[in-house]
Amino acid sequence: MKIYRCFFYVALAAVFVPLQAAAQNIPSPHAENLQNCLEGFTGCDFARLSPQEKQALQSIKQGSNFLDCFYGYSDCNKKQLTAEQQQEVASARRIHNLQNCMDGLAECATTRLTAEERQQVARAALVRNFQTCPDGTGACDPSQLSPAEKKQVAEATHYNNLQNCLEGLGECDRAQLTSEEQQEVALAAHSRNLKECLNGSDFCDPAQLTASEQREVAVAARGQGHKLPD
């Protein structure tokens, strides 16, 4: 079918290009009328075309209609398709529908799927669901996960939560952390606060500094010409 389309495109170009060149070379008003017909403009007078031009124009219209049908455009007129073109269009629509179903798109007609294709779509849905669960994106349905997947999701969720806590970004649930992880998070928060203080940031909390850190910050503040926040 793909080979057929390639030959079709070549044949269509072989008809259209010489005809368009002729329209540009033939003196007006015939050239203007031919150009209007080639472009589908309302100024086209089909009766003024030569038999060769009429035949070529008809081939172009049939080819354009085939492409409209092949890509599912609303201008498609299936009645003008040959039997072979109808088969190719139907095959293209089946493939397009299957791809929509595999991708979980709304434009999916499950009734047009074979039993084997339904199984493929169901497996794809399980994979998509599993992929959305660890990172918290999309609609995750834990009930569709296998025991091994549930374990992976739990580990990924715990890791993401730990990273948020360590970086002080996003949602951090310290209740889900182990004692060791809570200590790591506290140390990371302390380090961030010290850095803010050393840089003279308004986000500095002097109350969280040790005595030695306060002296270090005071020295940095004098060097930068600002004072430690109260």
Image (cartoon, rainbow, N blue to C red):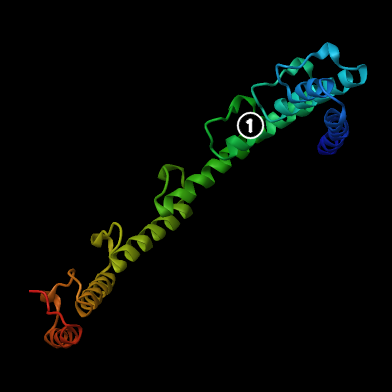
Q: Does residue 155 appear left or right of residue 84 in this picture?
A: left
Towards the viewer: 43 or 91: 43
Please report the residue visible at 41 percent of the width from the left and 45 percent of the height from the top: 142
Relative to 165, is 109 above or below?
A: above
- Judging by the rendered image, the residue that carries numbered circle 1 is 97
Q: Does residue 86 appear left or right of residue 19 in this picture?
A: left
- Amino acid type, residue under disc 1 in the picture: Asn
On the image, the x and y values in percent for residue 208 come to 14, 75
On the image, the x and y values in percent for residue 171 come to 29, 57
Determine the image quadrant of residue 62: top right
Q: Secondary structure at mark 1?
A: helix
Quadrant of the rendering where the C terminus is positioned? bottom left
Number of numbered callouts drawn: 1
Quadrant of the rendering where the N terminus is positioned? top right
Please report the residue visible at 66 percent of the width from the left and 34 percent of the height from the top: 96
Q: Does residue 112 appear left or right of residue 185 in this picture?
A: right
On the image, the x and y values in percent for residue 146 come to 48, 49
Please report the residue visible at 45 percent of the width from the left and 49 percent of the height from the top: 132
